[in-house]
Image (cartoon, rainbow, N blue to C red):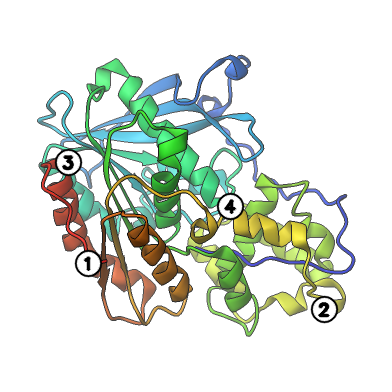
């Protein structure tokens, strides 16, 4: 989802982010020598129990080296599903799940084993189709080790490094696999960023296509839209600010802009996942949480939102794009999607954009899944990508 940016006349650089509780599982910790590793290097492997909603699939948790927004090494994780009748170098789909959360337990590698319907519906049926077609599926924890919800550019890098790690792990037999990307909403942000960053960040990857739906492509415009007037998605927007402050503590001292009620609200959601975030945001808006009601333009703070807005990134994917959304969506800024698609088309990217009229953000995701899967299948089979630019 998107982000709401806070700036007030009293903002100072002394604020400290509200960090998530540390993950109690030592597997997720970064090794002492992580600085000597390269992006995508495998740091740890853990075979996981099978999942009833992915029957027959082998599950492997992979820890790998990535890089955060400050250029520092981090340990990240991806969960790889291997189909029952896996063939060496068969297609690999990196699916960036919707992860709306600030707690480490919200990551998909944990959520898959929590019997949480948010991680099973609506995408498990689509991923089972992928597995039945012989594709392996990678599910990265694209918010990173600090659950930096809203840090979409970070999510793109973690996605690409997770693909590298999966392909470098011999037992997964993916070394020469063609790769596709897919994701919706918050997962769509990580997907769109991965596609845009790949030519410079991971040019060696053989990415054949990127399917990205319901993407908040401009966090700045989205922030203004849902930060006021008690928007029903305000809880997610507030959470995105918390996550961005975690990723950019020196540039987005959000905590200094909050009054006592705002600080209490942030502490209350510091380890929350989707449903709790939405519930705690109902009936609230930014004005009641900001000091002095001064919502001025803090250039450093808004620059963070701009840097995580794929619409404003000057890079262009080198892979075909399938993009889908609802023209009635009241959560994401639709003009940003239209402008991004147009920019990609003008740069020669083959873009197939499809609309699914429904006022509900998540319903549009489900309506687009069949077309998404067929489009991905065409890319893996080497069929020329369609375009309605």
Q: CA distance from mark 2 to mark 4?
A: 26 Å
10 Å neighbourhood of mark 1: few (<14), some, or many (≥20)? few
Query: Is there a contact, CB below 8 Å, between mark 2 and mark 4?
Result: no
Q: How many marks?
A: 4
The residue singled out by tag 4 in the image is 102
Report whether residue 113 is seen: yes
Closer to the chain start, of discs 1 and 4, is 4
- Secondary structure of the residue carrying tag 3 is loop
Give the spatial CA distance, label 4 vs label 3: 30 Å
User: What residue does disc 1 label?
Assistant: 388
Is 111 placed left or right of 2 in the picture? left
Q: Position of residue 321 (x, y in %)?
A: 29, 55
Q: Secondary structure at mark 2?
A: helix
**Residue at image mark 2:** 293
Write down the quadrant of residue 7 in the picture: bottom right
Residue 214: % across, % down: 38, 66
The reply to whether dot 1 and dot 3 touch (C-beta < 8 Å) is no
Check disc 3 and report the residue beneath it. 55
Between 39 and 315, the one nearer to me in the picture = 315
Image depth: mark 3 or mark 2 in front: 2
């Amino acid at each position: 989802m998107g982000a709401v940016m806070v700036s007030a006349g009293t903002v100072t650089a002394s604020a400290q982010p509200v960090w998530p509780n540390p993950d109690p599982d030592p597997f997720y910790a970064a090794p002492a020598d992580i600085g000597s590793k390269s992006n995508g290097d495998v740091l740890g492997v853990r075979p996981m129990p099978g999942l009833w909603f992915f029957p027959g699939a082998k599950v492997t948790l992979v820890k790998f080296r990535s890089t955060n927004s400050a250029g520092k090494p981090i340990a990240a994780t991806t969960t790889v599903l291997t189909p029952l009748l896996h063939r060496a170098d068969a297609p690999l789909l990196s699916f960036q799940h919707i992860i709306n959360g600030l707690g480490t337990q919200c990551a998909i590698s944990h959520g898959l084993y929590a019997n949480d319907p948010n991680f099973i519906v609506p995408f498990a049926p689509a991923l089972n189709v992928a597995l039945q077609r012989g594709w392996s599926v990678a599910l990265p924890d694209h918010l990173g080790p600090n659950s930096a919800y809203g840090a979409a550019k970070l999510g793109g890098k973690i996605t690409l490094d997770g693909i590298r790690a999966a392909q470098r792990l011999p037992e997964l037999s993916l070394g020469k696999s063609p790769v596709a990307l897919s994701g919706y909403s918050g997962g769509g942000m990580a997907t769109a960023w991965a596609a845009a960053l790949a030519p410079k960040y991971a040019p060696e990857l053989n990415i054949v296509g990127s399917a990205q739906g319901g993407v908040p492509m401009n966090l700045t415009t989205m922030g203004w839209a849902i930060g006021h007037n008690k928007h029903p998605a305000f809880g997610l927007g507030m959470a995105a600010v918390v996550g961005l402050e975690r990723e950019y503590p020196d540039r987005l001292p959000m905590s200094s802009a909050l009054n006592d009620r705002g600080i209490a609200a942030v502490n209350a959601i510091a380890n929350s996942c989707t449903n709790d975030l939405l519930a705690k945001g109902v009936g609230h808006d930014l004005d009641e949480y900001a000091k002095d009601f001064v919502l001025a333009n803090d250039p450093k703070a808004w620059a963070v939102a701009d840097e995580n807005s794929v619409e404003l990134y000057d890079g262009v994917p080198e892979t075909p794009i399938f993009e889908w959304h609802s023209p009635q969506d009241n959560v994401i800024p639709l003009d940003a999607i239209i402008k991004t698609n147009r920019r990609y088309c003008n740069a020669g990217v083959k873009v197939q954009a499809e609309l699914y009229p429904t006022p509900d953000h998540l319903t549009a995701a489900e309506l687009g899944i069949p077309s998404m899967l067929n489009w991905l299948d065409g890319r893996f089979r080497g069929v020329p990508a369609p375009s309605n630019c």
